[in-house]
Structures are given as structure tokens and as C-alpha cells.
Amino acid sequence: MTAKKQFKLKVFLTVSIYCVVIAAISSVDAATTVTPVPDSLNPQVGATVCVQIKVNDAVDLYAAGFDFSYNPGVLDYLSASEGALLNQNDASTIMQVWYLNGDKSSGKMVVGISRLGNSPGVSGSGTLLTLCFRVIGSACPVCRYEFENASLEGAEQDSKLDAIWNSAKLKVYDPNQPDFDRDRINDACDNCTLQANTDQRDTDNDGYGNICDPDIKNDCYVNYGDLALLKAAFGACTDNPKYNPNADFDGNGCVNYGDLAILKKYFGKKPGPGLGNCK
């Protein structure tokens, strides 16, 4: 193996799983995307969930590595397996996984994967690797996979590949806890406790899911001001500059009569109930 293409765990990304809602991290002007894709978005305590790390539109990708952090009270790491992306053209690859400082209870491990020898980098899309966990707790049923300090390595020495790093939610459901609207999101962490919304869509991040939040202006009261904002976006879909995602209460991609009906239901009232701060 040449020094140029030795496998080095010098490229790191940190993946955190925690129970707060924040925006996905991304970098601009990058065509390559990396996305964690769980095989279940709503696993139950006791289930096994596997997360594929998907790479789309890579160019000359040779290696990747990351520090991986997770809540050991919610997830118990089981295994890792290589995906097909770096195995293109029958190239030999290597993947290593170990716990940081050898301590599994810390919830931190190091993962590295690379092509070997003089093989060139790969281009295209596919699965980089798969990580599997057993769900052992439900401290909060909406948790998040997220990338930080992220980079990919190309075939040339010290080459870094620009990429957009997406995030994904994992929603742990505990059947022994209350779930009034039966959307498999326990009431303690449901952003709409009386209206089913498994996707927990909350475009203004105010703690209330869109389906129960016609309070577009965020003053804790649904009134004519919100009606005016909905009217300004009425009839617009996602491809229209007038589209306002905060006015798309039902999440169908357009602001229309369905959203007007939801606003009418809440007119003169507070949004929610959910996780927001309106009292």
C-alpha cells in the first residue's frame, strides 16, 4: 500500500443522538450529500434499529471515519457492517469499530472505513456502512442523528470532499406511557398531544407541531393577524416564492383550504397543546 493511500482515521464526523430539535447542519455549494437513514423511524423499546449511512453523488470518495456518540441509556450498540459503496470494482476495503477508551458504557465509539491499495476513489451513490442498535430506553421519543465536524476523504493525499450533511429523527415509543392521540409519540414529548402527527413537523421550531399551530406570528393567540399571513400565502405550493411552510399546517406542500379549516378550528384560541411555552 502506498503512503498516499494508507488507511488513516484522520477524517472524523461526530454523530449525536439527543432529545432536542435543532436544524440540520449543512455546507453550501456542495453536491454530495450524507444522510443517516434508519430502517424504522418509530421503533419500540426492545426492537432493533439499523441505520444506513447513505452517500449521494460522491466524487472520488476513498475513505471516511467518525467519532460516534449516542445515549447508552436509550440505545445499545450491536454491530456495524460495510455497505457496497466503497466496494465498487471489487476493491478491497477495511472497516474498524472500537469504543473510545474501550468503554462501552460511555456511549462513544470510533468508526473508520476505507478502500485499500492503489484503487481509485469511487463516484456515485450508495450505502457507506450500517450501524445497528437495540432500543433499551425511551427517555424521550424524538431523538436525532446529527453530523458535526464532518468531512469525507478523496483518493488524493489530504484531499477533502465538500458535502451536505443531513440529520434524521429517531422516535422511540414506549407502549407503557400515555399516548392520547395514538400517534406512537408519547404525550410527554409530543408536540401535538391531541392531534395525531407522527412526523412531528414543526417548521418554526416553537414546540408545537404545525398540525396544531395556526399561530403563524407566534404570539400564543390565533387571530386575524394569522389569517392575514395565511391569506398572503394562500394557493402557493413549495415551488412558489409566496409559499410559507409555517402556514402549511397539514404539511401537504400547499397552503389551501385544508389549512384554512385548521386555522378556523383554532381561531381565538392558543396553539397546541404540545411542548411550546404558551400558557
Image (cartoon, rainbow, N blue to C red):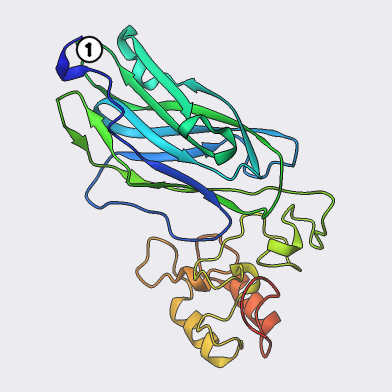
- Provide residue 220's location: percent of width, then percent of height: 60, 86
Identify which residue is drawn at 59% across, 78% down: 214
Q: 10 Å neighbourhood of mark 1: few (<14), some, or many (≥20)? A: some
- Provide residue 49's location: percent of width, then percent of height: 63, 34
Up the image or down, 167 lies above or below 113; here it is below
Quarter location, residue 119: top left
Up the image or down, 116 lies above or below 232; here it is above
Identify which residue is drawn at 40% across, 43% down: 14
Quarter location, residue 126: top left
In the picture of the structure, the residue carrying the numbered disc 1 is 119
On screen, residue 225 versus residue 118, left or right, reads right
Query: The residue tagged with tag 1: helix, strand or loop?
Result: loop
Q: Nearer the viewer, residue 21 or 10?
A: 10
- Provide residue 103's location: percent of width, then percent of height: 54, 33
On screen, residue 46 versus residue 201, left or right, reads right
Q: Quadrant of the N terminus?
A: top left
- Provide residue 2's location: percent of width, then percent of height: 16, 12
Q: Amino acid at mark 1?
A: Ser
